[in-house]
Amino acid sequence: MKQYYLLLVILLFNSCQYFDKQVPSEKELLQKELKTINWKEVDEYPSVADCEKIENKTQRQQCFFEVLTQLIQQKLSADTLSVLYPELDTIEVKVTVFPNSTIKFEPQFPKDSVAYDKVKIDSILQARLVDFPKVNPAIKRGIPVKTQFILPVILKVE
């Protein structure tokens, strides 16, 4: 019987080492997880209702860009931009979609461009580019995030 007690005591002392494993700290786990996240990509791109039914991520993104470009072109088609700047056929618009589904538009010009009144073009864009359909923000790991992209908008179609 003493042998069993001795064996039980030995097993008990040896089994304690299995409970002494070090648990990684929260900071180490957080840093490891942050390194694995690709911050340049989102899980789901922004979308409008017309594109929600598309399952393919790339096709949904393309649909969103096409719908948004068409809406911007429609809103700017009968505008003073073509009258004020007849040589301006395409304008690049920086679109920012915020997590709360609001959209901000900013015209993009070449750095050395002085031929255009940037303030006037910006004010025309801000006045015309209103009343857009609801845009669902991009999603990263289940959380809505801010996204920015530049769309080339054709003002004149010949």
Image (tube, helix red, strand yellow):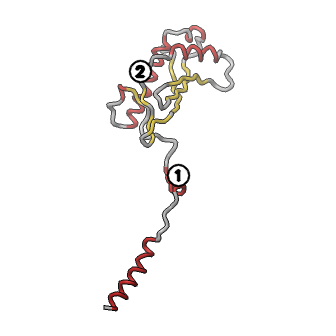
Q: Residue at x 42, y 41 (%)?
A: 142
User: In the rendered structure, which amino acid carries the disc numbered 1?
Assistant: Lys
Residue 126 image-quadrant placement: top right
On screen, 119 above or below 14? above
Could you tell me which secondary element the residue under label 2 belongs to?
loop
Which residue reaches farthest bottom?
2
In-image side of 87 versus 157 (left or right): right
Left or right side of 135 for 83: right
- Please give the residue where the numbered disc 2 appears in the rendered image: 133
- Which element carries disc 1, helix, strand or loop? helix
Quadrant where the N terminus sits is: bottom left
Q: Position of residue 158 (x, y in %)?
A: 48, 13
**Would residue 113 be found to the left or right of residue 67 on screen?**
right
Q: How many marks?
A: 2
Residue drawn at 48 percent across, 25 percent down: 102
Numbered badge on residue 55: none
Q: Toward the viewer: 80 or 123? A: 123
Residue behind mark 1: 35
First in residue order: circle 2 vs circle 1: 1
Left or right: 114 as drawn, with respect to 128: right
* x then y, percent, for residue 96: 52, 28
Q: What is the x, y in percent for residue 9?
A: 39, 84
Residue drawn at point x = 64 percent, y = 18 percent? 118
Name which quarter of the figure residue 83 lies in. top right
Q: CA distance from mark 2 to mark 1?
A: 36 Å
- Out of 28 and 89, give the one closest to the viewer: 28
Task: Give amino acid for label 2.
Answer: Pro
Relative to residue 106, is residue 144 depicted above or below?
below
Alpha-carbon neighbours of circle 1 within 10 Å: few (<14), some, or many (≥20)?
few
> Within the image, what quadrant is residue 6 found in?
bottom left
Mark 2 surroundings: few (<14), some (14-19) or many (≥20) residues within 10 A: few
Label 1 near label 2: C-beta < 8 Å? no
